[in-house]
Amino acid sequence: MRFARLQTADGIVNAVASGDSWRHIEDPFAETLAYTGAHTPADDAILLAPVRPRVIVGIAHNRGNNDHPLPMQAWHKSPHSVANPGEIIPVRRDIGTVNIEGELAVVIGRQAYQLTESNAFDHVFGYAVANDVTNIDQVPRDEKNFQAKSGINYTPLGPWIETEIADPENVATEVVINGRVVGQSGSFNLPSSVLACLVYVTSWLRLETGDVILTGAPNTFFAAQPGDRVEITLAGIGTLTNTIG
Amino acid sequence: MRFARLQTADGIVNAVASGDSWRHIEDPFAETLAYTGAHTPADDAILLAPVRPRVIVGIAHNRGNNDHPLPMQAWHKSPHSVANPGEIIPVRRDIGTVNIEGELAVVIGRQAYQLTESNAFDHVFGYAVANDVTNIDQVPRDEKNFQAKSGINYTPLGPWIETEIADPENVATEVVINGRVVGQSGSFNLPSSVLACLVYVTSWLRLETGDVILTGAPNTFFAAQPGDRVEITLAGIGTLTNTIG
């Protein structure tokens, strides 16, 4: 199923995709979905970031080129940085190059702590597209990924959450900037698997419903310039589009 | 004024101290406080962490001994780690030494971004005592402060927020473990001032109402053992007490 958050005339609502419309629901994380009876035609829908995490954890695979055996590390990104599909990302001009990074985002469905390889995916609600915007020139002076990962609207999420992915370890990713394909890769190129990310992060940190793990950019990071239109497509999920401001 | 969050028979309420009781209020961050008319005698009050931040930022002064001119760095700590006064901190046994750290916590009162030295304190709501529990033996293998700072109940906050501090740069700190004074220091020993922390953090990150900055441990960090009773007193604020589990 596809779960979205919509901006409507009556406020923000949760919804699930059904044919050509979004059927409004109460809590998307409830065991049994409660439909309100209202719906929004898909063509009219104003999509928001599909979840409001309290915790966002990114994965540092320690090498972007997938040839290094170092163990992964993790870091936090501010939940205030979550942006909607279509929102402008106002990159800073005074801090060097800013990268966009196309990533598979894992949305946690229920409390997750010290998960094992056999139960980790049971705690996953679904998957979305993330753009992990990064002040890449800050990395050498910021081993904690604070300066590198902070910025207004630096974590676009969307366009919705897909709960039915055949294999999260095999999600193809395509990054298009200004209509030109600049990168093709996928979660199969991550140095550590999605499963390994879930096990590692929760070996230290308790995650709660709605929290998000950004699984890393498998050669899907590119410098962005003001005015660029960035489209990140994850096969089986959808396309997240934002403009650099 | 002192602001607390109380557990009552009617649920969680916000309150302000008034003589021997806590007067219940609506939003503590409102420009004009709205009193509900109810109150809780101070002796009966069950104090919770006085705020539920969405973002907690810690400060790495890069040397604990205050003799090093390196610039500060910052890092995020999970808001799920906030614990109440009196709660047990279940330190992990399998990861080396666990430190308690007595710190001055700054609670943000309104949106704060790119603050200056002249306006930074205008965005502060008040101050509380924090215990920044740390898996200190993880630091050498975890430059991002993820493994080092993650754990259940690893951020006790309390016992309340004090909004009237004569000088946040001169708050004396005392750490007592099992009734014995183990450390005496204060914010005056921080390598970077509280003001500098506010300016640095918000030069990168937008903070929102209720967010918290942990300003660092000026020689107020000590190894803790299961069973230890830890009391951290900040002059003019109060004493935060927790037990290591």
Image (tube, coloured by chain):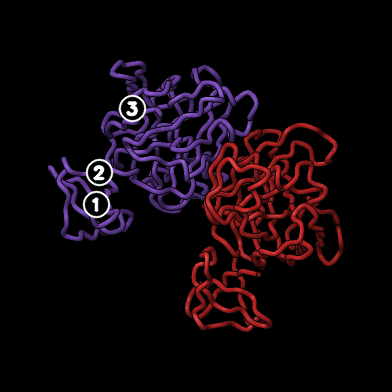
Chain colours: A purple, B red
* Amino acid at the residue labelled 3: Ile
Q: Earlier in the sequence, mark 1 or mark 3?
A: 1
For label 2, the SS is strand
For residue B34, say whether it is visible.
yes
Where is residue B37? Give x, y as percent.
51, 83
Q: Mark 1 — residue?
A: A8
Q: Which residue is mark 3?
A: A232
* Residues flagged by tags 2 and 3 on a common chain: yes
Secondary structure category for the residue under label 3: strand
Q: Earlier in the sequence, mark 2 or mark 1?
A: 1
* Label pair 2/3, CB-CB below 8 angstroms: no
Answer yes or no: are tags 2 and 1 on the same subunit. Answer: yes
Quadrant in the picture for residue B47: bottom right
Mark 2 and mark 3: span between their CA atoms?
Answer: 18 Å
**Disc 2 to disc 1, how far (Cα)?**
7 Å
- Going by the image, does B217 lie left or right of A194? right
Question: Do discs 1 and 3 belong to a common subunit?
Answer: yes
Position in image of residue A195 (x %, y %): 44, 36
* Marks 1 & 3, CB-CB < 8 Å contact: no
- In the image, what residue type sits under mark 1? Thr
Label placed on residue A189: none
Q: Chain of mark 1?
A: A
**Which residue does the image show at 47% across and 45% down from the upper left?**
A80
Front-lying residue, A13 or B226: A13
What residue is at 58 percent from the left and 40 percent from the top? B114
Is residue B48 positioned above or below A168 on the image?
below
Q: Is residue A116 visible?
A: no
